[in-house]
Amino acid sequence: MRKAIIPALLAFALVVLPDVNPAAAATRGDYEVGGVAEDNLLKMRAGPGTGYQVILGLPNGTALRVHKCTQTGGTRWCEVSLAQARAISGFVSWAYLRER
């Protein structure tokens, strides 16, 4: 019985637990905006989702400090502040952050 439980628990964990990227797991630290189309800006928002007000637009290369991230729907949102102006903070999509 014991031999059957361990493989069942492992199979359950592989199916139920989300796929965690080790690089994505360590979210706190210094990042920069990357991957935004040349004619576009990454929107910093007042909350973690597209329904929140846009605070400002950030071009590629903008230095940010990531404080924490949270999953909202299918998007991972990170609470950030500008590296050069820490008082300016908001939320951006994790998909457009590159470690510095």
Image (cartoon, rainbow, N blue to C red):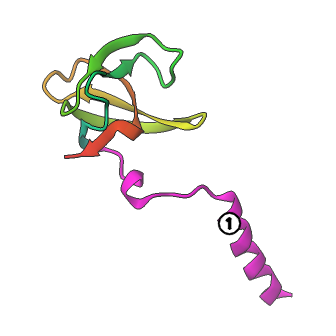
Residue visible at 66% across and 67% down in the picture: 14
Looking at the image, residue 78 sits to the left or right of residue 82; the answer is right
Callout count: 1
Residue at 19 percent across and 46 percent down: it is 100
Give the magenta range.
1-28
The residue lying toward the viewer, choosing from 34 and 77, is 34
| SS type, badge 1 | helix
Instruction: Name the residue furthest right.
Output: 1
Q: Please name whichever residue, 48 or 86, is drawn nearer the observer in this view of the structure.
A: 48
Percent coordinates x, y for residue 77 in the rendering: 45, 33
- Dominant SS of magenta comes to helix
Which quarter of the figure is the N terminus placed in?
Answer: bottom right
- Residue that appears at 31% across and 29% down: 37
Does the magenta segment cover residue 38? no
Above-or-below relation of 3 to 79: below
Task: Judge whether residue 27 is colored magenta.
Answer: yes
Q: Is residue 72 above or below residue 45?
A: below
The residue at 50%/57% (across/down) is 20
The residue that disc 1 covers is: 13
Q: Is residue 66 above or below residue 23?
A: above
Judge left or right: residue 96 versus residue 63. right
Q: Amino acid at mark 1?
A: Ala
Q: Position of residue 88 (x, y in %)?
A: 25, 18
Left or right, 46 with respect to 64, comes to: right
| Above or below, comparing residue 54 to residue 72 in the picture | above
Q: Is residue 98 left or right of residue 51?
A: left
Q: Horizontal and vertical percent for residue 70?
A: 49, 37
Q: Residues within 10 Å of mark 1 (few under 14, many from 20)?
A: few
Q: Position of residue 10 (x, y in %)?
A: 69, 74
